[in-house]
Image (cartoon, rainbow, N blue to C red):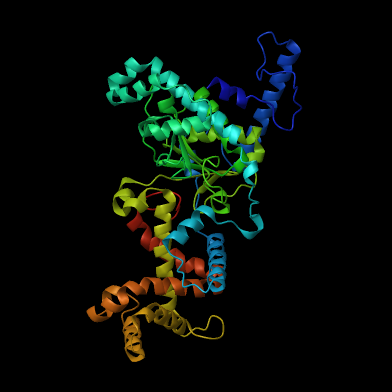
Amino acid sequence: MENFEKQFNQPSPEQPKNPERKQETLPPTATAENKEARQLQEQQDQQKLQEVREQLGIGEKKEDENFFENLKRPYGVEDVKNLQQALIEFEEKRKKENGKYVFDYNNFYQFLTSFRKKETQEITPSEKEIPVRDYEELELGIFQGWRQNLLQNQERVLQGRPKLAEVIKILQNEPLPKNLDELRDLYRRYPLLNDMSAVSYQEGVGEKLEKRSGFLHINMARYNAYKYEMPEADMRIYLNPPVEAIPKLSMHLVGLAEKEKIPLYFKIIDYSFQKFTPENAGRLDKMLVYTDKENAPKLAKIIEELQVKRPQWFQGRELPNLVAPIGEGVGIAAEPSKFQKQKFGEQGKSFNSVRALFMKEVWRDTTKDILIANKDVKPRGGRTFQQIFNDQLRLSLDYLKLDSGIVNRYIEQVWQAGLDTEKLSQEVKDKVGRNLESTLLRTMQDIIPNITPDSLVTWVGRRIQDKAPQYGINPENIALNK
């Protein structure tokens, strides 16, 4: 990691660089004048760091209970406004394309991971701006260090992990990759290497060297030949650096974590190895650090140092919608609990997937509550809430080609049942049951943008309190689990 530590010690972009000097750190024979200048710079950095801490309202140390006590993420009016904007944009697209789209789980997930306010829309960089050489330095550096550490410590490693014998044999027989193409080809030929390496592609590398996922994982316990075990993750730290800064920020983070002996496992989007699109460039979870409650404050502290030294990587950077902010451009949230993983299966594997399920159900039932309590209200001076719902249900049942009289009878029974599928007769449930949720979601798309946020936050707050226990979520702090 010496190379990454040197990367961290490079002067800031704003400072003049001496092109004739290749060494990044001061030599042992530095003059007293240079030492004084370095000490002064360190004092200035510490002063800036203290200013950042004061702005965040935190004390000198984060390694205490106050770190978690200070995490606040209630669901509020701004969250409602953001969803309203997302629904308006969704409806505009649907009408333009004459589609019958429903704002469902996938849309809630995309909303949580990618939604930006209009005034903060990010300019998508061109493919030429993707820092391929920086990605190469990061990935080859981690791979080469992992390979060297594993081969040098193979006797100790194999005592605890005999299955790595095949990995060691491959590494002994294969030449060291010199570039990313060679590394990826090595992983293609030996998928086991990708599975066990300190730098690995999520879901592996395909036969045509395409990536199956946008994420690259870096595991420093593996890099260090298992001198320590990664603690079981129960927290996630989110960062959203500019695309061009991702690999350099990763190298800095690795260097600082190694220096402070903090276990580190994180993933980043590798834009050097997947089709670059505005959609994946717009994700707000470009960098995700997995950690536990003991090490989360320590990692937050070294990230603060990076905020001071490289503020341009953090300033004005938006985060996924439901994480708790712990500084500009940095947020934290709970790793899915065992309860969530077991209950929700594939959709229980990430913070945002669990929250997407949760918010879909919360807003679906909030819409139901509003409809029942305000059937005769005309939100836009035209149709009533009840008429809007009825029209949406007719649209959902259109494919059945039923007589209009039968459809009207079904609609009447749906209202008598309080819009509750379980209270319908078996006949109506068979025809309408599976369409009722999509009808409620379509109605949500239609009416929610037309209700004042201050009013909506009260309605949705009730459903958050009601539904949170079923999802293992803290209703007062939706970034955390209960």
Q: Indicate left or right for 410 with 126 as reference.
A: left
Above or below 84: residue 302: above
Q: Indicate left or right for 480 with 164 as reference.
A: right
> How many circles with numbers are drawn on the protein?
0
Asked which quadrant contains residue 357, the reply is bottom left
Q: Which residue is drawn at 59% across and 44% down?
A: 329
Query: Which one is nearer the viewer's eye here, 472 or 64?
Result: 472
Above or below 361: residue 415: below
Query: Which one is nearer the viewer's eye here, 324 or 266?
Result: 266
Asked which quadrant contains residue 136, the reply is top right
Task: Confirm whether residue 304 shows in the render.
Answer: no
Which residue is at the far bottom? 405
Task: Confirm whether residue 117 shows in the render.
Answer: yes
Above or below 217: residue 363: below
Q: Residue at x 73, y 10 (%)?
A: 31
The x and y percentages for residue 28 are: 65, 9
Which residue is at the far top? 29
Q: Residue at x 55, y 40 (%)?
A: 272
Q: Indicate left or right for 348 with 422 as reference.
A: right
The x and y percentages for residue 256 are: 54, 27
Query: Which one is nearer the viewer's eye here, 74 or 269?
Result: 269
Which residue is at the far front? 208
The x and y percentages for residue 18 are: 75, 22
The x and y percentages for residue 375 are: 44, 83
